Amino acid sequence: MKLARAIHFDESDMNVFHSPGRTGEWCISGGFEFSNWSEGDLTGKARQAFSNGWLGVETFGRVTFVAVTQVEPDEVTALTQSLAQHFVTVYGAPSLEAALPAATEEINQMLEMCEEHEANTLLTVARELTDAGVRESFRIIEQRDASLDMFAVHGGE
């Protein structure tokens, strides 16, 4: 099985999101957070989270990029439980049992999206409000046969 982990190339997420996710945490789209939003809600850092933020399932913070990687079944179970608890605590689901189907669906959607990609494939999300609700689209940035130091800029003289 494959799922996506938060990845940071610089510190920009720390500045653009109210609650930035942690590097390496498991992520899902998290578009459900915006299901009742209108144009009036889309200001400042909230707009940034809406526009292109993945949801970390450990901190419930947002990140711009995720990378596909292997996930173990017991990790998926723990993430599903955590997300269901989040639905109870933050969104008022009546019980963990009532929230589990929705949490399972969210995790399964991300598992399905990631399964078709090679490890280290980067993904981005873009959202827009439409008359029918929130529309999400995803961009795939394929792994290249290049090492990170070919892109990294190192300071010093």
Image: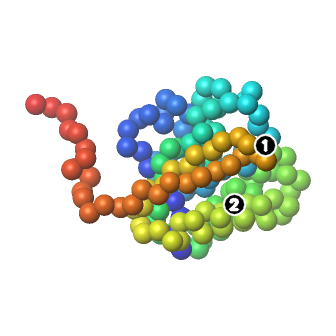
Q: Residue at x 73, y 43 (%)?
A: 130
Rate crowding at label 1 as few (under 14), some (14 to 19) or many (20 or more) other CA atoms within 10 Å: few
Where residue 111 sits, quadrant-wise, is: bottom right
Q: Is residue 151 visible?
A: yes
The answer to whether residue 157 is left or right of residue 102 is left
Q: Which amino acid lies under the numbered mark 1 shown in the image of this protein?
A: Asp
Quadrant of image for the C terminus: top left
Q: Residue furthest right?
A: 94
Could you tell me which secondary element the residue under label 1 belongs to?
loop
Task: List the residue tagged with mark 1.
Answer: 131
Left or right relative to 156: residue 123: right
Q: Which mark is residue 106?
A: 2
Tell me the SS state at disc 2.
Answer: helix
Residue 5 at x, y percent in the picture: 49, 56
* Residue drawn at the location 80% of the way across and 51% of the way down: 88
Which of the two residues, 132 or 81, is positioned nearer the viewer here? 132
Residue 11 image point, x, y percent: 41, 35
Give the image quarter of residue 152. top left
Q: Residue furthest front?
A: 131
For the residue pair 108 and 137, the one nearer the viewer reads as: 137
Tell me residue 60's x, y (percent): 63, 45
